[in-house]
Image (spheres, rainbow, N blue to C red):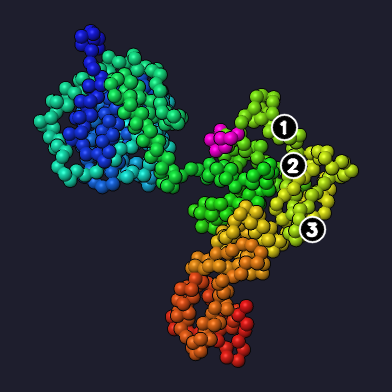
Amino acid sequence: MNTDDNELIDGGALLDDVEAWFGRYIGVTDDRDLSLVTLWTVATHVAVETYTSPRLLIDSTTPGSGKTTLLDHIGRLACSPLHAAALSSPAVLVRALQGGIRTLLVDEADRSLSPNKPGVEDLIAILNSGYRRGATRPVLVPVKGGAWEVKEMPTFCPVALAGNSPRLPDDTRSRSIRILLMPDRTGRVEDSDWELIEGAALELRDRILAWTEQVREQITGMPVDLPAGCIGRAKEKWRPLKRVAVAAGSHWPEIVDQLITRGMAETDAEHDAGLSADPPGMVMLRDLHAVWPEGEDFVATERLVSKLVVHNAEYWGLSSAYGKALTATRLGRLVSQASKVTSTRPGGVGPRGFTRASFDPIWERLGINPSFQPGEAGEPGEPGGNRRSEQGGPSRGTPTGLFDAPTNPVGGRVTVTTPSDQGKPPGQPGSPGQPGISDTPIAPVVHAASATSTTPPKVTCAQWLRGHVLALMADEVDTIESRDLFAAGEAAGFGIDNLRRCVMNCDLIATVGRTGHGATYRLGAGSTSTVVPCPQWLDQWLRDRGDWIKAADAFAAGEEAGYERTTIKSAAKRIGVLKRGQSVLTEWRLDRYDTKEAV
């Protein structure tokens, strides 16, 4: 449509009128959502020019909130609406888009896009790919002679999805802009009587058509400024609305910036609250940065496993959704998948582990390590050079480097040297195969390892436990839950019964609290237990009662005192409890003539 200067439409006033229209008939929880719907609806008419089209997610917590009504209004004002009460198949969807850009309006998305619906993966794939111009899907079409040929059909189109808290995949949500509707109980929202308001809606749509035709060339490739942090996928979904707002002028560019800032803040809040989750590989990289010991370049894998379990027990411990505690093998697999970094054994001696130099550029790129300063190509620094080259150590890419040597559990550190380093002056750098010093105790005595040795010294459960506790104390950890400590031990390859025995005999661990889920340990030399072991408690409890007592009463009293049911049952065997009866009628009593010591 060609317009003369005296026929130019005021874009800001037009958007104000569209927003007022939605405000008359739609109830929202935040008035800024009316601005969002206005911009999205108008942007459907210039979807080709804006290159991408964000999905509009119309959400509600209960039926009767006005989702279908909003789709009806969008359908009157948007570009070539295509109502779909249910998406039957991917083939039907792509064929409906052959004739040009359509605005797909999907009602009851919580049903039609349910993860349990057969074939929903193909529908989701089309919706995800179709948010960017040029997206296509190969479809078989019949040709003369009864044959078939593959034809690329377009999938690009604006999409609005309405449903009661629809369970959409994360990649679909990342392409969506969400508004929330609630039922209007105040009577402020007018009834959408289309017999009376149809004409006014069509007049408003004609004004939208005229204005978008007027600014179509202006919007194509228009550079716009977005709030800080609006990059990547966020930029792709917000930039179309910002272009429409800039073309309209008035106060609309500021409104879009407010919407973008609000949207990013909501995303961050949902992430912090655990409502949206990172993939395990991303969680691993972030937690590795959090637990990496200050000033250490190489850390053994088993030591990292222990630190991760203590740092984020809900994700890496026994209670994780994975069903078991983190292991060295799983840690290595996740790190390799997320960053292509693999563990090494520097010099072919000692335990396998990871170097900080291999993670620094990855942490910097992900924004996890803002203090990291990359260097120029060929100069010290990352990437391009190597931070360790400044220290006289081997550069990245070599199979050698410093690593942690074991510590003597009895006290002090042990430095291991290779034969090629013997006889060198004390201040001279070691050879590439020379290990450094570690805080990880793994054997009471470590002899000088030969340059060809590849098997690290084996440790007992007691030695591992003492070393692990000393490492926790060095990190200023003074208390730990029993399940977290046992999870770290099981990840290191020790059985739960062996760990329990070693905990009881360790002079650095004292029980200071107990719940139905385990105990709380205080770490440190000279700590005194303030909670008695279960066998000692049960022995005294039965002595106080003298005669036969129901086993159910003993379990109830023990659980109230903080002991687990299995622990009480095990304690009964240890102190020689006599039993009679079966099932709920079972009774217990101490053997009056042969009472065993509780502890």
Residue shown at 20% from the left, 29% from the top: 20
Q: Is residue 318 above or below residue 74?
A: below
- Depth-wise, is mark 3 or mark 1 nearer the camera? 1
Q: Amino acid at mark 1?
A: Glu
| Residues at marks 3 and 1 touching, judged by CB atoms closer than 8 Å | no
Is disc 1 surrounded by few (<14), some (14 to 19) or many (20+) residues within 10 Å?
few
Q: Is residue 443 left or right of residue 193?
A: right
Q: Which image quadrant: the N terminus? A: top left
Instruction: Give residue 575's position: percent from left, percent from top.
Output: 59, 81
Residue shown at 45% from the left, 80% from the top: 553
Dot 1 or dot 2: first in sequence order is 1
Q: Nearer the viewer, residue 417 or 344?
A: 417
Instruction: Give residue 10's position: percent from left, percent from top.
Output: 23, 17
Q: From where the camera sits, is residue 518 visible?
A: yes
- Depth-wise, is mark 1 or mark 2 nearer the camera? 1
Dot 3 or dot 1: first in sequence order is 1
Residue shown at 51% from the left, 57% from the top: 319
Q: Is residue 154 left or right of residue 107?
A: right
Q: Which image quadrant: the C terminus? A: bottom right
Question: In the image, which disc is placed on residue 402?
Answer: 2
Q: Which residues are magenta?
A: 365-372
Question: In the image, which disc is placed on residue 390?
Answer: 1
Q: Amino acid at mark 2?
A: Leu
Instruction: Give residue 376's position: percent from left, percent from top.
Output: 65, 24
Residue shown at 16% from the left, 22% from the top: 203
Q: Which secondary structure dominates the residues rendered in magenta?
A: loop
Q: Amino acid at mark 3?
A: Val
Instruction: Give residue 37's position: percent from left, percent from top.
Output: 28, 31
